[in-house]
Every structure is written in structure tokens, then in C-alpha cells.
Amino acid sequence: MELGLVTSGDALKSVDELLPQLIEARIGSRIAAQDATIWGPAAEAESAIRLGWVNPFDAAQQLVPAILELRGQLQAEGLTRIVLCGMGGSSLAPEVIAAHDEVDLVICDTTDPAMLRPILATDLERTVVVVASKSGSTVETDSQRRAFTAAFQAAGIDPATRLVLVTDPGSPMDNPDGVRAVFNADPNVGGRYSALTAFGLVPTGLAGADIEALIEEAGLLHDVLATDDEDNLAFHLGAAMATAGRDKLVIAGVGDALPGFGDWAEQLIAESTGKDSKGVLPVVAHPGAPELRDPAADVLPLYVYDELPEEIDEEATAVHFSAPLGTSFMIFEYATAVAGYLLGISPFDQPDVEAAKVAARSLLDAPAASAPDAVDGPVELFGTSAVTLAGALDELAAALPDNGYLAVQAYLDRIGDSELEGLRDALASKTGRPVTFGWGPRFLHSTGQYHKGGPAQGVFLQLTADHREDLEIPGRPYSFGGLITAQASGDAGVLSDEKHHRPVLRVNLTDRAAGIAALLEAAK
């Protein structure tokens, strides 16, 4: 795969303007040296414990052989179905790596019982479950681990032969009792920067990905990214991301280039930059998306290629990028840290993520039911004065500011309900504004930070559903259906509270199939 980055239009002007500042401040070499002072005094304490990602290579020398040894053991036992229970960066990076290497890895990053049930019921006799959590106490992964443990026991399988844990040293999960193996990750790497740590390498390595080649790719530009000169691609990308007035970064993969990479980059950029009412909003789209046909003045297109095109329109504002996957991870991580410096924010904290978790926990302790504002066939409407679904969508669109965006948050089955993704383009055409699409609750661990901490430009369409077949969580007083409902309600409550004042329309599907069809029709 070709390596290169070309900026044009306003993005090129931004690079020309900001590159001397980055070189003079020695940002590349200081990041490589893990200098925690780059982002200012307020960010220094967090930065000091979050820069391990700049050198994943020493840890990989120890980690990769251990992963490959375990893979050989599992394959010899016929255990070839790898399921990953993880959220945010712990699942998005492995998803990209597995897709890139065309290996089977089942991603379990949901609390929707409709998606969980078939994952739990499929081929347990050849299944190994990797449970990944930095803190060791993530509610989703803890619940999933409980469900798989019970499923293994019900099938007469000893869970201790089938569970592999990935966590930080000293976490509640850092315990070898009752599991096949425990892999420790570098505690000085945040989840969204963890693609090349144990969180990215263990599940994909066990699934058969060439993790040795991935690490080798990551090292291709290691020395270049640590330099302070005009050849540093991270300087160019970070400066482009900080282009004045263009804070909507629309990421589109061209052809088969790095499938799923946009979703990984979305969580990295949104959670890193969306705070202090600043940020860069990543929008995962495709080359023919409405936002890219005639880009608005605040949109910065970013095209990802296998090979850069021979001719690029130098007048049109855009970023054109191509690199091997491992190299791409490193460039984007460096560039996001560079953009944080240019924007004047810390790229390593996530101060607004916890609010939604607290709200969800409170609703689990004391569930609250409310009557819909209106019912339109197979959907219930909350947070609107309209009496029809089409009217409610029009009302939400009318609340969009001129520089705003619409975020679709689907607390549903991203496999079984995947046709809902067509809603993104439909609403982008309808509103003339950028539209993001996130599956809940996984986006809460990434873009949820931008929604609350970034610029107050968003309006939110939250999609939930009744759970006709719920699924209990062993050892917990609530079910998966109760958990995902609390997560959705908690996040909506935080978005619309007195601090944030974000417009939220919730559409609850009382009949999934009919409700999805109604949504797609109403969005036209």
C-alpha cells in the first residue's frame, strides 16, 4: 500500500501557516520523548500517564510471542472462533485489524439483547472469549463476561479454558484464577490510543491476524514522526485537522482502502479533541456522501486510498491519505496529539464521558418510565411537540444551527438492524448538514465525549426499541434490556440537561422491522 499525504485548498493553507510553529516548538521530538508539558499545565498530570503509545515496540517484543504461542495451543484444541468483548478503542482497533487481514473475529460491543443472543448461542464448543477492559470494571464487558461464563457452564464447558483477559496491571480483572490467560496492557496508554498494545494485538493475533507485520508497519515512520521538519506527515495531518473554520472532518474510504478505519479514527479524534467547547467532529461517510458532493464551508473532506490518485484538484479543499494500516495508526495518533496542541486542549482526557455512566447507574438503581409525547404507528416519540414521525424529524432538523450537525444514536443491533445506516445519507440530504451515525452504547466510550464537551452545535436523534426477548445478566438485578435502556436514557438526560441544552428526539421502536421502515421513509 502506498504511503503519502497531500493537502489542498484551505487545508494546504493551514499546513503552510502552522508548520513553522510546529517545527519551532519541536512538537514531533517532544511527543516522541513523551514530554507531558506540550499541552499546558492543566493537561500535564494526565499527559504524563498517557504517552506510552509513542513506543509500542518494546512491549510488543514480549507480547507477540506470547500471543502466537497461545494461538497455536487454541488451534491445536480446535478453538478457532474468537469473540471479543470490548468497548470503544478496545473493539474498534481490533475490528479494523481483523477486516484488514480478512480473519474472523466476532466483535461483541453491545448490550442489546437482540445482538447478544445469537453471539452467545453460536458454536460455543469452538469459542474462546477475549474480555478487554482497561479499568477491569467496564459495565458492558463485565456483563458480557458474566453471560458467556453462564453459557459455557450451561453447555458443560469449563469457562477457565475459554476466557482470556486483557486489562491494565492491578485492575479487578488482573487475576489469573478461573481464566485461560491474562495479558497486561501498558497502563500509560489510553483506550483510544491502544491499537498497537495488547488491546489491539491479543484478540486479532488469536484470530489469526499477522500482528508481527502490523508492528513492523507501525515502525516504518517511527523516526520520521519524531522529527521536527516539514517531512513529518503527522504535522501535515494535524495542521490540516486544525484548519480554521473547517471543524467537520468527513472521512471517506475510497474503494477497499482500510475497511473500518474511519470508525477507529472517529473515536480517536472525537474523544481526544471534543472538549472545552472546541474540537474536530469526525464524520464517517463514503466518497459519494451528500456532505462531499458540494462540501459546506465548515467541512474538511479526508479521503483514504490504497494508492493516491495521480491527479488531485489543488483548488478543492481536502486531505488525501494513503498508508499501510500499522503506519496509519501511528500517523493518526501523532496527528491527533498535534491537533490537540494547535487547538489548545488536552488530547488525553475525557471529562464528559463519566456523566452518562453516572446517569445510567442511577437509572439502573431506580428505573423511571415516562409516557411518549406521541405515538405514530410502530414508533413512540419523546422530546417533541410533533404528532408524527416525519413532523418530529422536521422539528429536529429545524433546530440545527447553520454550523451544526445531526448525530444519530442507534441503541439497536448493528448486525441485524444494519439497514438503519441508510438513515445517515438520507438525513444528510434532508438537512444539508453533516450527519454522524453511532451504534449505542459503544459510541458512549468515544464520540459521546464530543457530543457533550465539543461545540454546542449538535442535535440528536436517539433510536431505541422494545425488547421482546430480554436477556438476564447473571448475578445482577437488571437485564441487558434494562441496561441498554438505562444507558440510552442516561445519555439523553445529560445531553438535554441545564448544562448542555442539546436537543434530543428519542424514537422508540415498538416493532423493530416496521419502525425501521417507517424511519427510512420519514427521512426521505
Image (cartoon, rainbow, N blue to C red):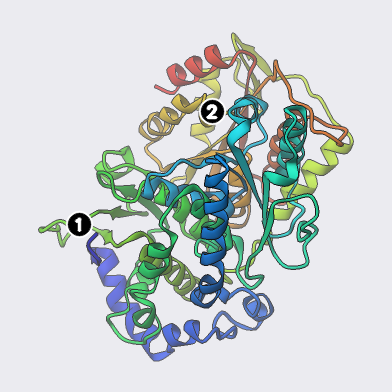
Position of residue 302 measured from the top left corner of the image (x, y, whole percent): 31, 55
Position of residue 429 measured from the top left corner of the image (x, y, whole percent): 35, 32
Q: Which residue is located at x 49 percent, y 47 percent?
A: 207
Is residue 403 something one can see in this rendering? no
Q: Which residue is located at x 41 percent, y 50 percent?
A: 262
Q: Would you name the residue on which mark 1 appears?
A: 307
* Residue lying farthest to the top in this orientation: 377
Dividing the image into 4 quarters, which one contains the N terminus? bottom left
Q: Closer to the N terminus: mark 2 or mark 1?
A: 1
Dividing the image into 4 quarters, which one contains the C terminus? top left
Q: What element carries label 2?
A: helix
Foreground: 245 or 426? 426
**Res. 395 mark:** 2
Q: What element carries label 1?
A: loop
Decide: is 51 above or below 409: below
Decide: is 408 above or below 65: above
Q: How crowded is mark 1: few (under 14 residues within 10 Å), some or many (20 or more)?
A: some
Query: Please, what is the three-letter code of the amino acid marked with disc 1?
Result: Glu
Query: Please, what is the three-letter code of the amino acid marked with disc 2?
Result: Glu
Quarter of the image where one finds residue 223: bottom left
Position of residue 258 measured from the top left corner of the image (x, y, whole percent): 34, 51
Q: Which residue is located at x 31 percent, y 53 percent?
A: 301
Foreground: 195 or 21? 195
Quarter of the image where one finds residue 410: top right
Quarter of the image where one finds residue 120: top right
